[in-house]
Image (cartoon, rainbow, N blue to C red):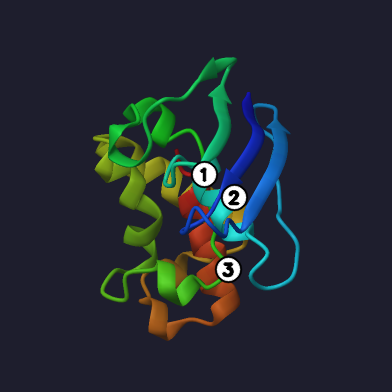
Amino acid sequence: MLELKDITAGYDRRAPVVRGAHLTLQPGESLGLLGPSGCGKSTLARVAALLHRPDRGTVAFDGRAVTGFSHRAPRSLRTAVGVVFQQPRLSADPRLRLRDLVAEPLRATGRREDVAVRVPELAERVGLGADLLARRPHEVSDGQLQRACLARAMVL
């Protein structure tokens, strides 16, 4: 279970973009953040994924408070949350084929043996045909690329 309690976060302590946010996700649950531009959706997602340390509040996994963020967080926690950001073109390496984009987290965590099974399975689940997996980001639509980013977030 992921819990965010009373999260205040931003990039300047004097002007946080998120104030007093609370969030609870059970294992296997998905959540979409909705709101106007600049309201803190991406910042809150980055806090939940342990990519950004909040100014105030606690992040807990399975009832245990997280103390390390970014590279200081244990790998098991860093890989527990997958984030799909709004702009797939900014979060996808243009040199990678979609197959490699989806497989990137598996390779980064030393689970290369899972690539052959997980990538096609998730591609089908998000509606990407096998022919699209051989293409690079500039060769597919934004929607197709976003589906590849969704598969990448789910692969671990």
Between residue 75 and residue 14, name the one nearer to us: 14
> Badge 1, how many Cα within 10 Å: few under 14, some, many 20+?
many
Q: CA distance from mark 2 to mark 1?
A: 5 Å
Is 94 positioned to the left or the right of 13 in the image? left
Tag nearer the camera, 1 or 3: 1
Confirm or deny contact between disc 2 and disc 1 (CB under 8 A).
Answer: yes
Residue 72 found in image quarter: top left
Looking at the image, which residue is at 42% across and 84% down? 139
Looking at the image, which residue is at 74% across and 71% down? 36
> Badge 3, how many Cα within 10 Å: few under 14, some, many 20+?
few
Mark 3, residue position: 86
Amino acid type of the residue tagged 3 in the rendering: Gln
Amino acid type of the residue tagged 1 in the rendering: Val
Confirm or deny contact between disc 1 and disc 3 (CB under 8 A).
Answer: no
Residue situated furthest front in the rendering: 14
Q: Is residue 123 above or below residue 52?
A: below
Looking at the image, which residue is at 58% across and 17% down? 62
Q: Which mark is residue 44?
A: 2
Residue 60: x and y in percent read 56, 24
Amino acid type of the residue tagged 2 in the rendering: Leu
Residue 112: x and y in percent read 26, 39
Q: Which mark is residue 120?
A: none
Tag nearer the camera, 2 or 3: 2
Mark earlier in primary sequence (1, 3): 1
**Which image quarter is the N terminus in?**
top right
Confirm or deny contact between disc 2 and disc 3 (CB under 8 A).
Answer: no
Q: Which mark is residue 47?
A: 1
